[in-house]
Image: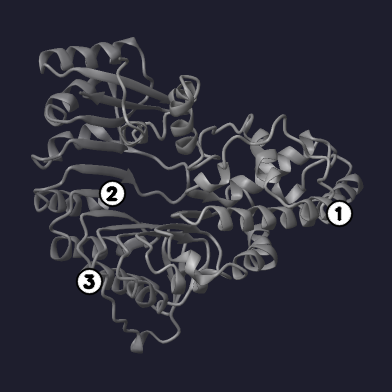
Amino acid sequence: MAPYLPPECLQEIFNNLVDDFQTLHSIIFVNKLWCATGIRILWRKPFSYDNEWNNLYKIIPIYLSFLSKEIKIQHELQEVLISTKPFFNYVSYIRELDLYSLLMQLCEWMVKSKFISTRPRILTESDDFEEEDPIMRLICQDMTEKVSLKRNMYIIKEIIMIIVEKSPKIDYLEMTMGNMDGIVFDYLDSEYFSDIFNDISSEWFTKISKLEYDGRYLFKKFTEHANNIKKLSFGFHTFTPDLIPKLSQNSNLERLQLRNVEFTVHDYDNFSIDIKFSKLISLELFDVRMASQYPEKSLVYLIEQMMKSSKLISLDLEPYIGVKYDKLLEFIPCHCANLTEITLKINEAYEETMKTILKILPNLNKLRILRITEDWGGIQLDGGKYIDKLILPNQLQFFNVTGLLFSDECLKIFFEKCCSDLKQVVLLLKNYNVKHEQIIKSFSLEKKKDIEDIIVSIDNKSEITINWR
């Protein structure tokens, strides 16, 4: 008798392949059982597998096939056919809904299927136009926005309603700007996204455990009804600080990420908040700033209260805070002694603060040292000057030190001093070449470390990622 694995075992095994697109595609050609199991996993997050988006638009007709005949006629989609009737109830398998990706792929399909001659200008990923005539540009803009956008958004609404009806188990919702302009996203958020999600029952939101949202018009609805959120990411807007206490009322929140957020405080003298993030273990702050009479003091106070009330084991601290950054770092020893992961931005002014923090975090497993810059380009500090000053925690296994730039002469010294017990290191070199590879392999051989891979990312400098088994 041929070996047999019950479906439950296959499901458990294949669950570990959720991000392995090629293997999942191979699985579906083995037999009927493997096919059914693989399809369920592939359709958990159908727009997440192809970063280039070369062919993702081809699955749009599958969504459209679930629309009623009346809706197809209403939107002139009655001629949309797929080769055969869908063999699976694909939509019911969706667990992660990325609205930006869905919208972009619908626009792409509209163009490729010749339902429209061009995709809406405001949804394109580039502001470059082939037409240099400004009058033609305006005509193109007007035509695409009026004809295409409205139609696409109506279809998007119908698709989402089908997904909500047939897939009640969605736990991840992403509504981010992607490559849209912020003003464009706000327009879509207020005119279309709000209309879509205000028509969905509050009960549906209770299933969501991960939310990424760059808007503001639906924020109240999300935070009030999606009360089982464990991971929340939002940004690109101005809020009042009382938003933070409201978020802390979500007793399940474990991971909070703030991106490009500005808080407004009108009365600093009476500025006080009561926060209790009882389950918060991860806090990421990127370009968080305060608009008030005392912006730095206000922000330091706000973040301190968030640290105090939580049980952080992971902290990513990259706020837009200027000269008071050291004041914020002082709170880490007081409120974050159990950290296992931390990201710090440094310059020469914060050298001593950085060394102090590393000394008092004995459980640190992952460390990222980035650079403080006044622009996106920035200048890395000389890694050679910091090698003797870096006293790394004994438990450290993952070290990203791209805030420092290492010369050829310092590379071997850095490996000897800092990398003997690491599983991964990410660093910058001026120019990666065969000599560097020889140094890495020689060090690994000497320390009996088995290299898993060496990944080289080349821009204006070489970023090297070394993984050891």
Q: CA distance from mark 3 to mark 1?
A: 51 Å
Instruction: Answer with mark 2 or mark 3, whichever residue precedes in sequence.
Output: 3
Seen from this angle, which residue lies furthest bottom? 270
Label 2: few (<14), some (14–19) or many (≥20) C-alpha neighbours in 10 Å = some
Spatial CA distance of label 2 from label 3 is: 20 Å
Residue 15's disc is: none
286 or 52: nearer the viewer = 52
- 177 and 32: which is toward the camera: 32
Q: Which residue is mark 3?
A: 309
Q: Nearer the viewer, residue 290 or 311?
A: 311
- Residue receiving disc 2: 343
Residue contact between numbered discs 3 and 1, judged by CB atoms under 8 Å = no
Q: Is residue 319 visible?
A: yes
In which quarter of the view is residue 241 placed?
bottom left
Judged left or right of residue 358, residue 383 is right
Picture coordinates of residue 296 (x, y %)?
A: 35, 70
At x 52%, y 53%, the residue is 167
Of marks 1 and 2, the one in the foreground: 1
Question: Which amino acid, mark 1?
Answer: Asp
Mark 1 Cα-neighbour bin, 10 Å: few <14, some 14–19, many ≥20 = some
The amino acid type of the residue labelled 2 equals: Thr
Does 170 appear above or below 384? below
Dots 1, 2 in contact, CB < 8 A = no
